[in-house]
């Protein structure tokens, strides 16, 4: 019985860690493919992606995962790694942008259409993403879900997948490094982030006093502090990136030593004052681009050639 | 703390400070709020171990308030640092107004912490196992003083020609 349990635990670990190994391989292959055709992909993105994968795998296979069933502190370290550190690092790897660079235009268009679809749009809203992330944790630690997770293998997989995905979606709903269908202002995202982080802090202190079912009091206290301070550390990184992006974007323009004030109505202007959205709108109505026209012309010619040969 | 000291030296370096008077004040207030919470965490929780992570008499509203202010202090400190950098690159930094903001923000947070969170919500006490009254008095009087000085500095810069 014992050996059977052990066997299934090991295979379970490999089962949920395997997708991350695949993602790592795919990412490297995509970098190789895209570097042959386009400007070389930044090395730091490869580094952060690799460390993100490493964090996720560390939380799923090996000592932390083995201990997590009996030791709540180990469980919490795993949670911070899988739900917070790994999503942040992996999001900085900009995987969707890399993917779009690698595949051909037609598939890329279809993919962006899927990414803009209603359900995916919905979960990427900062408030929804926060609720999925922090609300999910509240459900896990304050209901019967926590003891059930260690008995039911399917539930274990679903919860771990949810922790990672919710963490990832939350990260990309707050900081924009990759393709982002929804854009909210910096203030909006900061306020949502404030409440999400507060919800996380409150939950960790709540666990201190009210241990999840089946967790001893001293373990809950230590685990709670790991969640509280570990969460802080990661969130400091996240919010620094958010504000740094604001700092870069709101850089003042100086004309003859005097600052030029721009009217801010949420429109994006280039340095010379071109309204980017307006250009895009006009482009969409403009018909075929130069390259598309050439391609179309080439097709017409080859058609004409084949038809003359037949005759 | 004479007005001439700031007005004369700052004037040429930071010609745009009047236009950014509001941002100077808010940058200070946010930084003050954040820095007090940070000192509270590092000095009283971690180094002195006077404050407790959790107190049995903590009310639910106390827990929510603590969580919100904890999150807010982080975001405020980091945000205020970037806002400060922004003021500098716009040549709009106004030291006196910024310091006034810091004192105001720090005082308001400390007073809130000392009266609402410690006493009314009973989150935790300043120190355990001692007569708490002198600590509470010192804590809250210091807070009131910071608010007073901060408010005076802000008031003075309201009427001062910044350049």
Image (cartoon, rainbow, N blue to C red):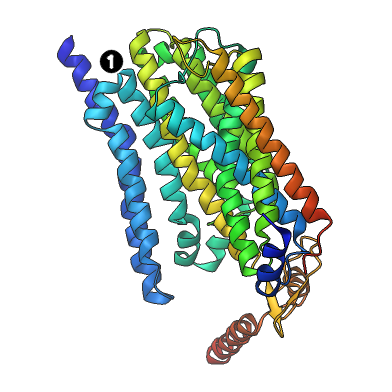
Does the image show residue A29?
Answer: yes
**Residue at image coords 70%, 82%:** A257
Relative depth, front residue between A264 and A45: A264
Please tell me whether residue A179 is drawn above or below residue B152 in the rendered image: below
**Secondary-structure class at tag 1:** loop
Disc tally is 1
Please tell me whether residue B100 is drawn above or below residue A155 in the rendered image: below
Residue B80 at x, y percent in the picture: 61, 50
A158 vs A203, left or right, is: left
Relative depth, front residue between A89 and B74: B74
Please tell me whether residue B96 is drawn above or below residue B35 in the rendered image: below
In the rendered view of the protein, which quadrant contains the N terminus of chain A? top left
**Residue at image coords 44%, 43%:** A87
In the rendered view of the protein, which quadrant contains the C terminus of chain A? bottom right
Name the residue tied to disc 1. A70
The part of the image, by quadrant, that contains residue A164 is top left
Relative depth, front residue between B4 and B20: B4
B107 vs A50, left or right, is: right
């Amino acid at each position: 019985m014992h050996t059977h349990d052990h066997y299934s635990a090991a295979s379970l670990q490999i089962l949920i860690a395997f997708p991350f190994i695949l993602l790592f391989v795919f990412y490297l292959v995509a970098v190789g493919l895209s570097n042959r055709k386009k400007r070389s992909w930044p090395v730091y993105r490869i580094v952060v992606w690799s460390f993100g994968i490493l964090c996720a795998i560390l939380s799923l296979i090996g000592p932390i995962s083995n201990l997590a069933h009996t030791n709540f502190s180990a469980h919490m370290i795993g949670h911070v790694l899988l739900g917070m550190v790994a999503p942040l690092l992996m999001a900085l790897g900009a995987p969707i942008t890399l993917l779009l660079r690698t595949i051909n235009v037609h598939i890329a268009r279809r993919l962006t259409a899927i990414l803009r679809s209603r359900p995916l749009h919905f979960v990427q809203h900062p408030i929804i993403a926060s609720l999925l992330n922090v609300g999910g944790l509240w459900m896990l630690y304050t209901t019967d879900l926590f003891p059930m997770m260690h008995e039911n293998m399917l539930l274990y997989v679903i919860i771990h997948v949810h922790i990672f995905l919710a963490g990832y979606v939350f990260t990309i709903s707050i900081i924009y490094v990759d393709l982002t269908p929804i854009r909210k202002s910096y203030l909006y995202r900061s306020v949502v982030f404030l409440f999400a982080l507060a919800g996380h802090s409150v939950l960790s202190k709540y666990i201190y006093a009210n241990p999840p079912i089946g967790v001893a009091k001293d373990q809950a206290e230590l685990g709670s502090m790991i969640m509280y301070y570990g969460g802080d550390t990661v969130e400091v990184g996240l919010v620094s990136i958010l504000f740094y992006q604001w700092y870069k974007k709101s850089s003042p323009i100086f004309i003859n030593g005097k600052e030029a004030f721009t009217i801010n109505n949420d429109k994006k202007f280039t340095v010379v004052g071109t309204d980017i959205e307006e250009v895009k709108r006009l482009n969409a109505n403009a018909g075929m681009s130069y390259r598309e026209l050439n391609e179309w012309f080439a097709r017409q010619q080859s058609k004409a050639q084949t038809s003359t040969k037949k005759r | 703390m004479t007005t001439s000291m700031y007005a004369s030296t700052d004037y040429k370096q930071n010609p745009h400070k009047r236009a950014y008077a509001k941002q100077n004040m808010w940058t200070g207030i946010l930084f003050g709020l954040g820095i007090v919470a940070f000192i509270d965490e590092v000095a009283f929780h971690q180094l002195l171990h006077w404050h407790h992570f959790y107190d049995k008499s903590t009310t639910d509203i106390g827990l929510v308030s603590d969580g919100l202010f904890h999150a807010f202090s982080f975001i405020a400190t980091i945000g205020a640092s970037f806002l400060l950098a922004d003021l500098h690159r716009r040549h709009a930094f106004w030291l006196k107004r910024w310091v006034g903001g810091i004192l105001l923000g720090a005082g308001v947070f400390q007073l809130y912490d000392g009266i609402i969170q410690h006493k009314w919500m009973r989150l935790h006490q300043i120190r355990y196992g001692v007569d708490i009254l002198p600590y509470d008095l010192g804590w809250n009087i210091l807070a009131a003083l910071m608010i007073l000085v901060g408010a005076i500095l802000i008031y003075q810069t309201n009427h001062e020609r910044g350049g």
